[in-house]
Amino acid sequence: MRTKSLKKNKINVVTLGCSKNVYDSEVLMGQLRANDKEVVHEEEGNIVVINTCGFIANAKEESVNTILEYVEKKNAGDVDKVFVTGCLSERYKPDLKKEIPNVDEFFGTSELPSLLKALEADYKHELIGERLTTTPKNYAYLKIAEGCDRPCSFCAIPIMRGKHKSTPIEDLVVEAEKLASKGVKELVLIAQDLTYYGLDLYKKRNLAELLKALVKVEGIEWIRLHYAFPTGFPMDVLDVMNVEPKVCNYLDIPLQHISDSVLKSMRRGTTHAKTTQLIKDFRAAVPNMTIRTTLIVGYPGETEEDFLELKNWVEEMRFERLGCFTYSHEENTHAYTLEDNVPEDVKQDRANQIMEIQSQISWELNQQKIGETFRCIIDRKEGNYFIGRTEFDSPDVDNEVLIDATKYYVKHGEFVDVKVNEAADFDLYGEPVQQSNFIRE
């Protein structure tokens, strides 16, 4: 048996899945740091905490493979302990304990105090907004609510995250102020459902009031909205977007499908006509808004006619940003009672067709940007390019602006005006204006 090291333990937090998991890992790391623990993110450590995703099949497979990888390292003596937390652990804890017994302990999504205790740390209630951020220094995720009350047939999130629970405005302002003090300039607001925000605390949809409070935080220059739900969208949010320059003219609103029969089976609470009108209302209210959506193809019972309706609608609506996923048949969801009757190759072909259409739309919209100048935030340097984004682009999922690093120098985390001189399907190429300030010697 391996002799335990006398050196101080180093805790490696490994994050899988969505931005909500990134946020949760950052909170965990902040708690550990406050307990004087040495903690790293996805680096070497003798104690490993894996924050898993359990949303769809591919994510679950990645999570299981990651657990097995670290269990092998434990068996080989390369790490001392392996702990598992997050959505996969919440959803499948009994099965995981049985199938992977060499994990030291499994924790659900709401068991942070217990996880900290296992790591010989105390849960500090006073740490409002104290996180160890893992994103580039200029932006951070701000989770404004946990859980979801929506009844979508295909989604297991309520099983893993519970009912919707909003975070009070005053706590979110404190958190935003602490992030700003560390140099964060952009807040990406996240939740399972932004538009439900406040109903539990304030008895009304209160996202607009939250935005009005957050724009007052000194140092924050962009506020971006992710994961809105189409039914019951609070239109006063668009009024704030129009008058507050800090609120990006950007909205991520997953619409999932457009066929009435599919929407009904998905239990989305809307129709083709209502969804189309909502998007038209958005664009009338904020004419230069960028709308990002996601779609699901291959849902049980989706016919060729349903899919053709979706294709035609995507061509008609010309979304600025769009992602498409194949349906994943998830246990304990309402849709699991239906027959998963669309073959996998058909699902993938349909997703490819949607993304081909979107690629063309994106290329055409990007060509219109050539010659224009955009204010960009610089996220990082990659190879021979500095990588930035406009207010119309969210980190990791949207278009990027590339600046030739062999010709120009720009600072990470700073805003730069960039003139676009070339455009591809999903990338813009440009040069900083006032070139004498940026040209490399």
Image (spheres, rainbow, N blue to C red):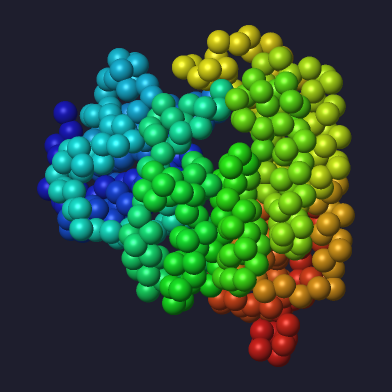
Residue 300 in percent (x, y) is at: 67, 16
Residue 2 in percent (x, y) is at: 18, 33
Quarter placement of the C terminus? bottom right
- Residue 15 in sight from this viewpoint: no
Is residue 228 toward the left or the right of residue 28 in the image? right
Residue depicted at x 62% and y 63%:
239
Residue 95 in percent (x, y) is at: 34, 16
Residue depicted at x 73% and y 83%:
433
Give above or below for 335 relative to 114. Answer: above
Q: Nearer the viewer, residue 81 or 173?
A: 173
Marker count (numbered): 0
- Residue 390 in sight from this viewpoint: yes
- The image quadrant of residue 294 is top right
Q: Nearer the viewer, residue 436 or 92?
A: 92
Is residue 67 toward the left or the right of residue 192 in the image? left
Give above or below for 97 relative to 1. Answer: above
Is residue 225 toward the left or the right of residue 144 in the image? right
Quarter placement of the N terminus? top left
Residue lying farthest to the front in this orientation: 203
